[in-house]
């Protein structure tokens, strides 16, 4: 054991000292991969082609022909998102793809760096080295890979949220950034729970105000499309794709595969939701008690992914901050933390969801989901529950912030609330 530990220590030191080269090689391999195996980036195509319709009309009638199971891809985001994506429609397709890819890779570094700063405030060069290593590895985790291949917006929104929480110094800036992310895509709105847990009341108020203001502006610019979306389409999960598919890694998707039918509104669903909520609440309370800022954030984000009716595998980019928390925790040698990190690694690095997707596509009937396939098809949900357990049982004190605050409150005297 001593020899293995020494070897791991030396390997870690070597990787840290060569982090820049590791990142360069990883990005180079990514560029080579997308050059040889050109991704379809169908979601980016939807953003680009559908966005002008927010002004002319017919935004939610748009359909992009794609491969099964989603043979026709609609625009599923709020109208404000279409306004944000409008500049894409002015760019040549190749330019749009290249810029989106570059921005998404940069966002992955921002996520890694900011997650490290939330966990260990005041990190210097070593923190940057770790961020480069995590970025190099994160490029090959399935949620990030799928986001890049589809041209999804997840990494950009994740970077906006994490960047706001770690870089911006005022409640106005933090709340506005999170509110804008929530106005583009509803799921980042769960990040507002972070403000409440860390008692950033002004930031929470600004997030809500910004999201509502952005929505109102979109309503002013596109009243018909806004009325359609907020009156009916926002709750219509069937427009997004088959809920039972392994591509959907939410709690409801996992239960639906295990039961063989949509688990929504059933007694099993409500019971399971209650148990998961209690576990997540305890994990959140423990992280708050320890002033563990990254633990608070990943608990909120993972809970949001679990309880959402649909959480496609590419939505689970929060696996990377979770893995950073597990790998750099002061009690990382605890069996539960090791098992949880191993589970996330196996589920995301082995591309389990795409593998199971190919098997699923050959099933004779979606209503008879084989148990041997249904259990591993719930991998992300299981990893999230393990993460809640790890955060719930962690007793190590969190690192002090360089400015003396441990609650994540705004750092200027005028912004501190009581």
Image (cartoon, grey):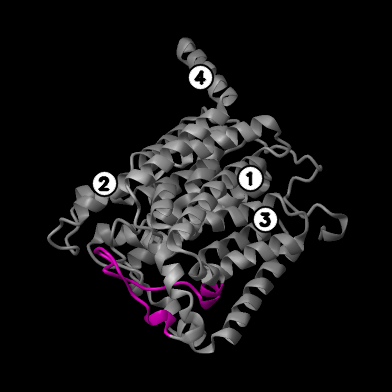
Is residue 18 among the parts visible in the rendering?
yes
Residue 284, numbered label: none
Q: Earlier in the sequence, mark 4 or mark 1?
A: 4
Of 33 and 410, nearer the camera is 33
Element at label 2: helix
Badge 4: residue crowd in 10 Å (few <14, some 14–19, many ≥20)? few
Q: Residue at x 56, y 29 (%)?
A: 19
Task: Find the magenta span and give its range.
Answer: 58-83
Residue 154 in the image: above or below residue 231: above
Q: How many marks?
A: 4
Element at label 1: helix
- The residue tagged 1 is 114
Badge 2: residue crowd in 10 Å (few <14, some 14–19, many ≥20)? few
Q: Earlier in the sequence, mark 4 or mark 2?
A: 4
Is residue 329 among the parts visible in the rendering?
no
- The residue tagged 2 is 355
Question: Is residue 81 within the magenta segment?
Answer: yes
Label 3 to label 1: alpha-carbon separation:
9 Å
Question: Is residue 140 within the magenta segment?
Answer: no
Badge 3: residue crowd in 10 Å (few <14, some 14–19, many ≥20)? many
Residue 11, numbered label: 4
Residue 28 in the image: above or below residue 171: above
- The residue tagged 3 is 164
Label 1 to label 2: alpha-carbon separation:
31 Å
Spot the residue most to the right: 413
* Placement of the C terminus among the 4 image quadrants: bottom right
Label 4 to label 2: alpha-carbon separation:
31 Å
């Amino acid at each position: 054991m001593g020899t293995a530990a020494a070897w791991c220590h030396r390997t870690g030191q070597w990787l840290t000292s060569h982090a820049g080269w590791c990142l360069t090689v990883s990005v180079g391999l990514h560029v080579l991969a997308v050059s040889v195996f050109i991704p379809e980036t169908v979601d980016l195509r939807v953003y680009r082609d559908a966005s002008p319709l927010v002004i002319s009309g017919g935004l939610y009638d748009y359909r992009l022909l794609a491969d099964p199971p989603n043979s026709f891809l609609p625009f599923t985001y709020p109208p404000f998102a279409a306004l944000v994506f409008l500049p894409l429609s002015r760019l040549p397709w190749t330019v749009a793809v290249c810029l989106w890819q570059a921005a998404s890779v940069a966002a992955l570094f921002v996520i890694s760096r900011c997650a490290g700063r939330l966990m260990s405030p005041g990190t210097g060069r070593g923190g940057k080295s770790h961020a480069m290593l995590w970025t190099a590895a994160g490029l090959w985790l399935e949620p990030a890979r799928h986001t890049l291949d589809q041209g999804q917006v997840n990494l950009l929104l994740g970077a906006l949220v994490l960047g706001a929480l770690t870089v911006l110094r005022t409640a106005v800036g933090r709340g506005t950034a999170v509110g804008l992310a929530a106005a583009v895509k509803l799921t980042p709105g769960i990040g507002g729970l972070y403000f409440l847990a860390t008692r950033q009341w002004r930031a929470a108020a600004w997030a809500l105000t910004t999201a509502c203001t952005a929505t109102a502006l979109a309503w002013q610019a596109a009243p018909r499309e806004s009325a359609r979306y907020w009156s009916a389409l926002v709750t219509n999960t069937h427009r997004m794709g088959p809920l039972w598919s392994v591509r959907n890694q939410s709690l409801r998707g996992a239960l639906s595969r295990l039961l063989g039918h949509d688990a929504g509104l059933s007694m099993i669903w409500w019971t399971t939701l209650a148990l998961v909520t209690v576990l997540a609440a305890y994990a959140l309370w423990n992280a708050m008690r320890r002033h563990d800022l990254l633990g608070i954030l990943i608990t909120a984000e993972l809970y949001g992914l679990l309880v959402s009716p649909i959480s496609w595998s590419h939505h689970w980019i929060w696996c990377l901050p979770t893995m950073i928390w597990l790998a750099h925790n002061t009690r990382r040698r605890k069996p539960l933390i090791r098992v949880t990190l191993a589970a996330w690694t196996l589920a995301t690095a082995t591309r389990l969801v795409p593998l199971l997707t190919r098997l699923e596509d050959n099933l004779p009937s979606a209503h008879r989901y084989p148990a041997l396939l249904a259990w591993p098809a719930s991998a992300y949900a299981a990893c999230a529950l393990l993460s809640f357990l790890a955060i719930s049982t962690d007793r190590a004190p969190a690192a002090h912030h360089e400015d003396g605050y441990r609650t994540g409150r705004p750092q200027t005297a005028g912004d501190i609330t009581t």
